[in-house]
Structure formats: C-alpha cells, structure tokens
C-alpha cells in the first residue's frame, strides 16, 4: 500500500492540481489571522469550514487523477478493488496532515489569539478540524468515486451539499419540515455550534452526545461509500 | 485445473447488455485469443475473465487472483519516468527490492527498452509504452496474463518484435488476449474464441501451430556482438559462452549472423 500512496502523492504533485486548493487554504488562513487578538474558538471554527471545502476539492482531484485504464492496472496490482478506495483515502490523509497542523499552530506561533490555549481547546480544535476534513473527504468521495461521479454536475452537486449543510440552521428556521431532510447532510452545526461566544469548551452531556452522533454519522457514511464504490466498480 | 468458469454470465453497462449468456471454462496454461469485430465485446469478456468487470447475471467462478492486466491503450497521463513507474508498480507486489530491480533490468533487456528507462513515459513512443504496460503486468509474476489488443498502433517491425518477445515468455502462464490480427493468434494462441454481439459464437482449439524454438549454445568473442541481433532472448554464461533462444523461423538467420561474426556453435536443441 505504501507504494500505491507514493504513486498517488507523486502523481498529484506533478499534476499541479494541488496548487488551487492549497493556495486558497493558505490565503484563507492568512486573512483569518491578519488581525491580532482574535477569538480562539470561532477562528478555529472558520478554519474548520475552510478545511471542509478544501478537503472536498482535494478528494475530488485525487479521485479523478487516474485514467480508467490506469485505475484498472492499479487495481490489478492491489488485488482488491476496495484497496484502491482505501489507498486513495490514506493518500488524502497524508496530504491533509500538514494542512491540519498549519491550521492549528499558525495562529499560535503568530500569537494571534486573544486568550491562552488550554488542553480542552486543543482537543476541540483538533476534533473540529478532523471532523470537517472528514466531512469534506466523504462529500468528495461521494461525487468522484461512486456512480454520481459520471453525472454532469458532480462538482456543482458537491458544492451544493457543502452550502446546504453550512446553511442548515437557517434552512430549518424557514420550515421545520426541512429538519427531517437535513439529517442526511453532514452535521456541521453539531461541531461548530459549540465554537461561538466565549473561548471555553464545556464537556457537558450535549457536547458528548453530539460528538458521538458525528462519529456514528461519519462511520455510517464511510461504510455506505465503500458499498457505493464497489457497486460502481462491478 | 480450471482457472475460470462462467455459466450463462451476462454483463450490463448503462442499460446495455454487452455480454450475453457467456458459458466458458479456461484451464491453467492455456493461451486463449479472443477475436471479433469492433464493439463485439472482446475487451469486456477479457475484463470479465480478469474480474475487472463482474457479472450482472449468471454465475462466474475465478480460481486465481494473481492477474497481470495490460490495457488496450496505455494511460497517456502517467507522470513518471519509465523506470520510476516500473519500480513503483513492482513495489506494490514484490517484497524484495533487489529481486524487483533485477527483474526490471531483465525485462527491459528482453523488450529492448533499456535505453528509455530514464525517459518520461509521456515522451515515449507508443511501442515503448505498450512494452511498459506488458512489463508492469509481468512484474507481478502473474498466473494469468490479460492483454487487451497488445499490438494496436504498433508498426509492423514492432509487432513482430513484440510477438516474438511474448512467445518467448514462460510456457506455464495462462495468457488471454484480444486481437484482430492473425500474427499474434497464429504465434501464441492454442485456443481461439470468437465473439459477436456479446456472445461467444465459436470456440476452437488450435493444434500444431504453436511455434517451436531453438536453443543455441555458442562461444562468442565479445558480448557486444549479439546485442543487436533482433528477435532473440539470450543469457550470457561465463566469460565467453551464450545461450540464445530463437524461433525456428528466425534460427537460420541468427545462426548465419553468429557464424559471420566469428562465433562457434556448441549445441543446438529444439525447445517448445
């Protein structure tokens, strides 16, 4: 698998497809911390949202990197079709790590925050970034590694999912009927809902329940994507 | 021993039935050619045998999973030098780096592409890419080698060269290939399947057309004098001895070249 990941990483770098999402991500973070004394949690919330968009973009680029015949050759070497999907996900995780570390530590090194970091804040900052990155990877996978990838509006649809999930609070306010539809979209507010206001994280029951909900949501969607990928590659 | 069995297998893609009621069994070691017109379902049948496609109806059993696959068109956008590409592909399957490097060097020599190893793949000719496609599959040391139109787009010289090299490959490998042209079928296949509109319309065994080979053992004054002889596979033994394998058709020509270049023939044996 490590050879497959190296193959994908080199191919991704040489394709230059990494430049636009990386550039936008770095510019987003630089602008976010252009001013000093910014609140900790809401700033991390904003960089988590940036990660959501960027990881969807990177995932779709990674999954569209190989030609069909190249994919068949790679699958023949990996032996199992599903290893191709897992290999792509691992590649995305490798790409994601420096971005995650940059998003967390850049404001700390530049002393941009109003207050001091605490262990709880670190834990929640990593959790929110990782959750949003995973949302992005799953949305990107849905529109580039399943049968939806062949549809004309795959890229547009993925943006729609991101926009709808980020505006789910306002959509539900319009009509409570949407509440029943919204649960299929990434539960972004179950993560950033706790990142408004004061810079402190309370480890209360509702935070724990929502985190468990997010974890279960991610696992269910990942399992569904494996099965949708298998269906596409039949 | 069968390596593939299909019973009334069908394959449907985007609502179109591309393979219909395929019933077929393939034994280990067979060299099967799949022929038919464009769009008849040759490549789809090849992919069904290899498991790249899975049946939408009927039953299929595959008894091996070590498959080497060579697509009809080698990917255009591969962003590696030929050698780097082969190393990465080899590392996906091979455990020992040393053995893999040795095998890459051997195959590069066999397929006469050693001089292009440091060339980026997108600058290589169609023939070199085709050979790279075959080598990446062979690096897996597959039990089953699937080749989709391996001679497509090659000039006549390259076609003969590649056919010779394929026919020199180990005899116990199961090779299944799609082809339009008689050259590869005559030289390699011992069974021919004809596909029409997604159905196998003919399944014939070819007898006696398998090419014979001659093994020449010769004493050579210098290694360089045999390097430019076309259509041969050779192994240098000791300081000044060489073992050359050549098809019977080419053997007289090769013997004449060797004698003209001051070599002495030590032994001639027939090989299949």
Image (cartoon, coloured by chain):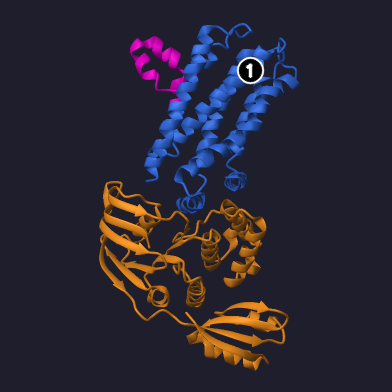
User: Percent x, y for residue A10?
Assistant: 62, 47
Which is the main secondary structure of the residues drawn in magenta? helix
User: Percent x, y for residue A57?
Assistant: 53, 34
Q: Is residue B260 left or right of residue B13?
A: right
- Name the residue: 53% across, 37% down: A89
Give above or below for A221 relative to B98: above
Q: Count neighbours of disc 1 (C-alpha within 10 A) and say few if under 14, some if 14 to 19, many if 20 or more.
A: few
Work out whether residue B81 or residue B125 is closer to the camera in this orientation and state it.
B81
- Of the chain colours in the picture, the one used for chain A is blue
B248 within the magenta span:
no
A173 within the magenta span:
yes
Tell me, yes or no, if residue A149 can be seen here.
no
Which residue in the protein does label 1 denote? A123
| Mark 1 element type | helix
Q: Is residue B19 left or right of residue B272?
A: left
- Name the residue: 59% across, 89% down: B267
Tell me, yes or no, if residue B252 can be seen here.
yes
Q: Which chain is orange?
A: B
Where residue A230 sits, quadrant-wise, is top left
Work out whether residue A119 or residue B267 is closer to the camera in this orientation and state it.
B267
Magenta stretch, residue numbers = A160-188
């Amino acid at each position: 698998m490590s050879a497959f990941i190296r193959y994908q990483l080199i191919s991704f770098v040489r394709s230059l497809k990494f430049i636009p999402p990386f550039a936008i991500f770095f510019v987003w973070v630089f602008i976010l911390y252009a001013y000093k004394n910014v609140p900790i949690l809401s700033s991390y919330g904003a960089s988590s949202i940036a990660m959501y968009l960027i990881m969807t973009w990177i995932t779709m680029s990674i999954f569209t990197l190989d030609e069909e015949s190249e994919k068949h050759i790679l699958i023949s070497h990996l032996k199992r079709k599903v290893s191709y999907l897992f290999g792509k996900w691992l590649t995305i995780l490798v790409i994601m790590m420096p971005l995650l570390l940059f998003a967390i530590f850049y404001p700390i090194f530049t002393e941009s925050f109003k207050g001091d970091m605490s262990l709880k804040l670190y834990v929640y900052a990593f959790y929110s970034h990782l959750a949003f990155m995973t949302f992005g990877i799953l949305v990107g996978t849905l529109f580039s590694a399943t049968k939806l990838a062949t549809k004309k509006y795959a890229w547009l649809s993925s943006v729609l999912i991101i926009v709808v999930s980020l505006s789910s609070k306002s959509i539900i306010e319009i009509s409570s009927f949407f509440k029943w539809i919204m649960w299929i979209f990434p539960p972004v507010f179950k993560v950033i809902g706790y990142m408004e206001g004061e810079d402190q994280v309370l480890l209360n029951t509702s935070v724990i329940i929502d985190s468990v909900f997010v974890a279960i949501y991610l696992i269910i969607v990942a399992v569904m994507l494996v099965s949708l990928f298998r269906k596409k590659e039949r | 021993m069968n390596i593939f069995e299909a019973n009334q297998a069908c394959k449907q893609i985007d609502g179109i039935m591309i393979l219909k009621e395929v019933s077929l069994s393939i034994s280990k070691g067979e060299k099967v050619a799949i022929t038919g017109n464009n769009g008849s379902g040759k490549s789809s049948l090849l992919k069904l045998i290899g498991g790249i496609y899975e049946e939408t109806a009927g039953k299929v059993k595959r008894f091996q999973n070590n498959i080497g696959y060579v697509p009809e068109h080698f990917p255009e956008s591969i962003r590696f030098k030929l050698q780097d590409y082969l190393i990465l592909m080899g590392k996906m399957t091979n455990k020992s780096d040393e053995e893999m490097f040795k095998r890459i060097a051997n195959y590069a020599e066999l397929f006469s592409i050693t001089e292009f190893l440091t060339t980026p793949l997108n600058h290589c000719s169609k023939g070199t890419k085709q050979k790279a496609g075959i080598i990446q599959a062979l690096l897996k040391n597959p039990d089953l080698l699937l080749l989709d139109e391996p001679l497509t787009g090659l000039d006549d010289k390259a076609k003969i060269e590649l056919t010779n090299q394929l026919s020199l490959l180990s005899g116990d490998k199961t090779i299944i290939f799609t082809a339009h042209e008689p050259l590869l079928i005559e030289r390699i296949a011992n069974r021919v399947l004809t596909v029409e509109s997604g159905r196998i319309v003919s399944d014939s065994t070819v007898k006696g057309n398998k090419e014979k080979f001659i093994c020449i053992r010769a004493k050579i004054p210098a290694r360089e004098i045999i390097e430019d002889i076309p259509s041969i596979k050779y192994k240098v033994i000791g300081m000044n001895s060489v073992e050359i394998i050549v098809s019977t058709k080419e053997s007289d020509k090769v013997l004449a070249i060797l004698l003209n270049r001051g070599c002495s023939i030590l032994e001639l044996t027939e090989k299949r």
